[in-house]
């Protein structure tokens, strides 16, 4: 398969940056919600944070599923060059999609836990 | 010396024979200017990086000297060796020097030297930027240290917390030196970062696809991106602080509705990524060293790459753990604890991967590997105390105590200095062409390792016993005497270890054995050239077919006729100008040839101009401003003057060949400048985001915020409209190039210039119409930062578009002018978006709260 930069570069960027971007957005939205809730005394904040966490964690996980499917479709032997045991740049991209999604889904869930246990504006 | 049997470098063995004429032409093209004037004009990465490293190491020794003075003072209780004022200056300068003048510049300098060799290219993409970065860094460092001459060295901590460093409590010029000197050093670091990013994405050996990129290159790519996004908020922060200190604004002044904690956010959103900006390159160095000295690839290369990337991202989500004791809400802290804990996963992957590599390889215990083992031990301890302080309750117990000092020295010396020494022992034979003494190296390592632990381990204990940081002395009888005495003794042992390496280096320069091309049997391309490398690095560009080319490839020559044909114009060529190869960012296939400038005095002139301008910011003298501006204009004019060598390049190689040859990439999306401009836009976007975030952060603490929408919104809307029109006109002009309508092209660019000028005019109007008084109100200050940013970006666009207009009228068909146009259109587009964001921010604010 030849490289088509116009098509492949955005896809590679999505695989490398997708899940981390979802996490960054989750951090930003949660932090802003807490600041807002604590200055206005809004009591729906816990539910809101939980909902936000579920949505963002699902989005990050979904990006991993997409990468996983692409990986399965390509097939392990289709990715590697016979002379070189490395997975090829396509394989690297897909693995990035899978592994980074796993790590960042975990961070999002971790970040969503504290509001369940401690007072939100303490 | 091992591997001395290989005396002909692999790259030379792969080179096909070329005529003598061609070889001499090529050598002329890549020759270096000589003498003092030559030193100013040279822009090659090798001489510049060498100076860069030497300067960085000198600052390391200076910072170490300051540490030694502090340890004398703290060795015994109630010591009077240093008075409190001097102690404050010394601990501030120790932190500032080590962070900003040693580690970052030194790592970047090392990368600057090694990256083109490792990637298999001839230089970094923007040689003049390399030179500018170096001179700016050198002058910035001298500027910062000049404060000692005035008896006004910075004394408010390397973190410059407010209100301690506000105008009110720090009236001297000490922290102004810090503010300004630091910005200079940071700008230079960002220049090198931009180079590294573009180099990694565009300037690799043919065939080096992403998955074949060595780990050091990956680490430096991630580091470059982190520098861009991490340093920008601090530059914005220091500008705001300096405005506050001049009494012009009140961002951090509580009486005027300002918020001191905003400074802590701005500082640590830089400061924590900074830790990883220093550590990630170390990951790269350690990986290369482990690989070479264990004689096998790093276990799970791909996971290692992903761990580096994950670390880079996560490092931006844990800065608040420096602020656990500032009274933030529990949940807000919880968010940051999450990332602080999870970052242990990628770090764990890295550590276990290295251990597995050593376990399954055949370690050869040379000095670089010794330093790596020292790193593994020390850094792991520092990592564990890091997980401890990531837990809020524990942090509250040890916050601002010597426990934290112990923790971060384990992380920084263990995680950065030991790997850097490993890297030095690994690469110095390549750089100097001389081998270092293994025996002295092993001694240096042993003494440093023991000295380090003796110096810093007791600090954990002193901290747990309650000893606070940053104190110039302490009373007897609190149980702190013994740990402090041991620490001081250990510090001298550590310093002795460092000096042994200095001696080793000096000795190797004079008496060291000549280094063969590949003394360690390394796997990466830098070992395929002579030691020291030729200035052109690769007359024959190596062709890569594997992740470990020197281990797995029989030859670095092209095996297929197609690649040979494509690469022929670069075989010991071009001869009348400097040329390099551009590859596809993903698969590493050859894409184009780029022209590189040969020599230029303008980076030096421009950095001198900066010195005048920064001195003017400090001393507020008109003649300094004028001289600075004149020099800057001269420097920029010279820089952008068309190059004769580029004209030759255009003569020799078509930009759109019709016979399948590689094109010359000049101007537009195929040129390096376009990618560099994207990096610049990323810097501007980060600065804008920082400004807007600060605005809303201040709005959330609404002391003295007005209840109604500000005046001047109409003018702001006009300014935004002007910026939009300017952006559109610039894009129109680009379309005119495609349609070959030179007249219309000139008219469009000129319109873009006019609209930009109008936009700036209305932008100033928007400010004056509001009748703001930023000195008395945080809200007015915040408005100033949002509108002021637009003035700055508008001015940049104006200059760029003016140059593009000049080209469009004088030489409408010249691709060099098209490059300027493309790049300025990109920045103009950003400026338009930026104005819309500003307008929305100003419009939304007060009514909402």
Image (tube, coloured by chain):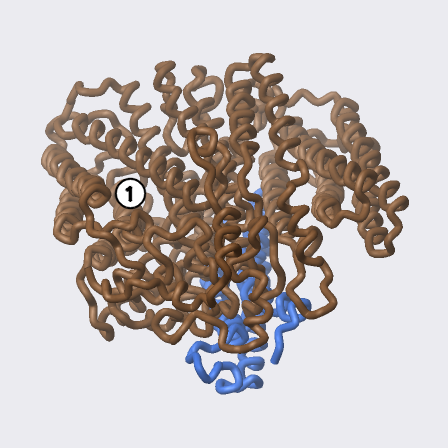
Chain colours: A blue, B brown
Q: Which residue is mark 1?
A: B404
Left/right placement of residue B17 relative to residue B440 reads right
Q: Secondary structure at mark 1?
A: helix
How crowded pointer 1 is (Cα within 10 Å; few <14, some 14-19, many 20+) is rated as many
Residue B665, quarter of picture: bottom right
Left/right placement of residue B451 relative to residue A83 reads left
Question: Percent x, y for residue B39?
Answer: 44, 33
Q: Residue at x 64, y 66 (%)?
A: A10
Q: Residue at x 37, y 66 (%)?
A: B10
Question: Percent x, y for residue B140?
Answer: 45, 29
Q: Residue at x 74, y 37 (%)?
A: B803
Question: Percent x, y for residue B455?
Answer: 17, 41
Number of marks: 1
Q: Residue at x 51, y 52 (%)?
A: B26
- Residue B254 seen by the camera: no
Quadrant into which the C terminus of chain B falls:
top right
Q: Foreground: B640 or B306?
A: B640
| In the image, residue B581 above or below residue B551 | above
- Residue B777 seen by the camera: yes
- Chain assignment, label 1: B
| In the image, residue B422 above or below residue B600 | below
Of all residues shown, which one is farthest toward the front? B20
Question: Percent x, y for residue B742?
Answer: 87, 47
Quadrant into which the N terminus of chain B falls:
bottom left
| In the image, residue B319 above or below residue B356 | above
């Amino acid at each position: 398969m030849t490289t088509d930069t116009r098509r492949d570069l955005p896809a590679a960027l999505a695989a490398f940056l997708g899940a981390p971007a979802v996490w960054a957005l989750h951090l930003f939205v949660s932090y802003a919600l807490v600041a807002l809730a604590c200055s206005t005394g809004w009591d729906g904040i816990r539910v809101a944070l939980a909902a936000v966490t579920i949505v963002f964690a699902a989005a990050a996980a979904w990006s991993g599923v997409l990468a996983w499917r692409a990986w399965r479709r390509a097939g392990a032997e289709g990715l590697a060059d016979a002379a070189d045991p490395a997975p090829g740049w396509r394989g690297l991209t897909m693995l990035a999609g899978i592994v980074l999604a796993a790590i960042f889904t975990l961070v999002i869930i971790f970040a969503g836990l504290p509001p369940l246990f401690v007072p939100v504006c303490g | 010396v091992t591997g001395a049997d290989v005396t002909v470098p692999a790259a030379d063995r792969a080179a096909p024979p070329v005529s003598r004429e061609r070889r001499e032409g090529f050598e002329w093209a890549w020759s270096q200017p000589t003498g003092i004037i030559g030193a100013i004009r040279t822009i090659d990465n090798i001489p510049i990086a060498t100076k860069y490293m030497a300067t960085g190491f000198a600052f390391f020794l200076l910072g170490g000297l300051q540490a030694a003075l502090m340890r004398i003072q703290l060795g015994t209780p109630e010591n009077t060796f240093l008075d409190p004022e001097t102690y404050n200056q010394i601990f501030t300068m120790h932190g500032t020097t080590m962070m900003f003048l040693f580690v970052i510049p030194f790592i970047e300098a090392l990368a600057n030297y090694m990256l083109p060799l490792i990637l298999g290219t001839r230089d970094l993409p923007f040689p003049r930027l390399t030179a500018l970065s170096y001179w700016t860094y050198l002058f910035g460092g001298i500027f910062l240290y000049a404060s000692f001459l005035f008896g006004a060295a910075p004394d408010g901590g390397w973190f410059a917390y407010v209100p301690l460093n506000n105008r009110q409590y720090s009236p001297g010029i000490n922290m102004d030196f810090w503010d300004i000197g630091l910005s200079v050093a940071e700008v230079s670091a960002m220049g090198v970062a931009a180079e590294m990013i573009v180099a990694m994405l565009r300037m690799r050996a043919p065939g080096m696809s992403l998955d074949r990129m060595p780990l050091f290159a990956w680490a430096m790519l991630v580091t470059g991106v982190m520098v861009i996004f991490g340093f920008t908020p601090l530059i914005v922060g220091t500008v705001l602080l300096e405005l506050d200190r001049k009494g012009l604004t009140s961002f951090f002044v509580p009486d005027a509705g300002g918020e001191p904690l905003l400074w802590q956010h701005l500082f640590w959103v830089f400061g924590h990524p900074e830790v990883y900006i220093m550590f990630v390159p170390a990951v790269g160095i350690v990986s290369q060293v482990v690989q070479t000295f264990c004689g096998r690839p790093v276990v799970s290369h791909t996971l290692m790459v992903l761990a580096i990337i994950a670390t880079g991202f996560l490092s931006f989500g844990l800065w608040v753990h420096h602020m656990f004791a500032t009274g933030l809400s529990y949940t807000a802290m919880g968010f940051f604890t999450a990332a602080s804990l999870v970052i242990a996963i990628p770090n764990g992957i890295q550590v276990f991967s290295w251990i597995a590599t050593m376990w399954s390889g055949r370690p050869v215990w040379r000095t670089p590997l010794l330093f790596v083992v020292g790193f593994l031990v020390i850094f792991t301890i520092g990592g564990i105390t890091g997980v401890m302080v990531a837990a809020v309750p524990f942090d509250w117990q040890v916050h601002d105590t010597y426990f934290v000092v112990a923790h971060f020295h384990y992380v920084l010396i263990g995680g950065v200095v030991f790997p850097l020494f490993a890297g030095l022992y690994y690469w110095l034979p390549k750089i100097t062409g001389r081998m270092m003494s293994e025996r002295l190296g092993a001694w240096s390592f042993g003494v440093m390792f023991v000295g380090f632990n003796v110096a810093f381990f007791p600090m954990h204990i002193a901290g747990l016993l309650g000893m606070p940081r940053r104190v110039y002395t302490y009373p007897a009888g609190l149980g702190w005497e013994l740990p402090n005495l041991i620490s001081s003794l250990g510090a001298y042992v550590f310093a002795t270890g460092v000096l042994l390496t200095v001696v080793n280096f000096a000795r190797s320069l004079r008496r060291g054995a000549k280094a063969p091309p590949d003394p360690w049997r390394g796997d990466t391309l830098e070992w395929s050239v002579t030691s020291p490398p030729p200035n052109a690095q690769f007359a024959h560009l190596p062709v890569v077919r594997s992740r470990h080319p020197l281990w797995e490839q029989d030859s670095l020559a092209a095996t297929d006729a197609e690649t040979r044909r494509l690469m022929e114009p670069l075989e010991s060529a071009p001869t009348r100008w400097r040329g390099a190869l551009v590859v596809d960012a993903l698969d590493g296939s050859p894409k184009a040839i780029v022209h590189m400038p040969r020599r230029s005095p303008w980076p030096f002139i421009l950095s001198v101009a900066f010195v005048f301008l920064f001195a003017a910011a400090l001393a507020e003298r008109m003649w300094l401003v004028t001289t600075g501006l004149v020099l800057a204009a001269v420097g920029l004019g010279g820089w952008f003057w068309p190059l004769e060598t580029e004209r030759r390049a255009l003569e020799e190689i078509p930009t759109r060949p019709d016979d399948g040859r590689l094109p010359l990439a000049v101007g537009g999306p195929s040129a390096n400048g376009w990618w560099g401009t994207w990096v610049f836009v990323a810097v501007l976007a980060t600065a804008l985001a920082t400004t807007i975030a600060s605005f809303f952060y201040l709005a959330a603490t609404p002391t003295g915020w007005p209840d109604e929408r500000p005046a001047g919104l109409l003018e702001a809307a006009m300014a935004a409209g002007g910026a939009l029109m300017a952006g559109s006109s610039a894009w129109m002009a680009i379309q005119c190039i495609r349609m070959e309508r030179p007249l219309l092209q000139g008219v469009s660019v000129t319109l873009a210039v006019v609209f930009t000028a109008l936009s700036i005019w209305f932008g100033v109007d928007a400010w004056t119409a509001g009748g703001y008084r930023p000195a008395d109100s945080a809200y007015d200050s915040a408005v100033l930062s949002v509108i002021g940013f637009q003035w700055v970006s508008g001015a940049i666009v104006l200059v760029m578009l003016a140059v593009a207009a000049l080209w469009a009228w004088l030489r409408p068909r010249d691709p060099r002018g098209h490059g300027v146009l493309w790049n300025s259109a990109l920045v103009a587009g950003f400026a338009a978006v930026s104005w819309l964001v500003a307008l929305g921010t100003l419009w939304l604010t007060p009514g909402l709260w």
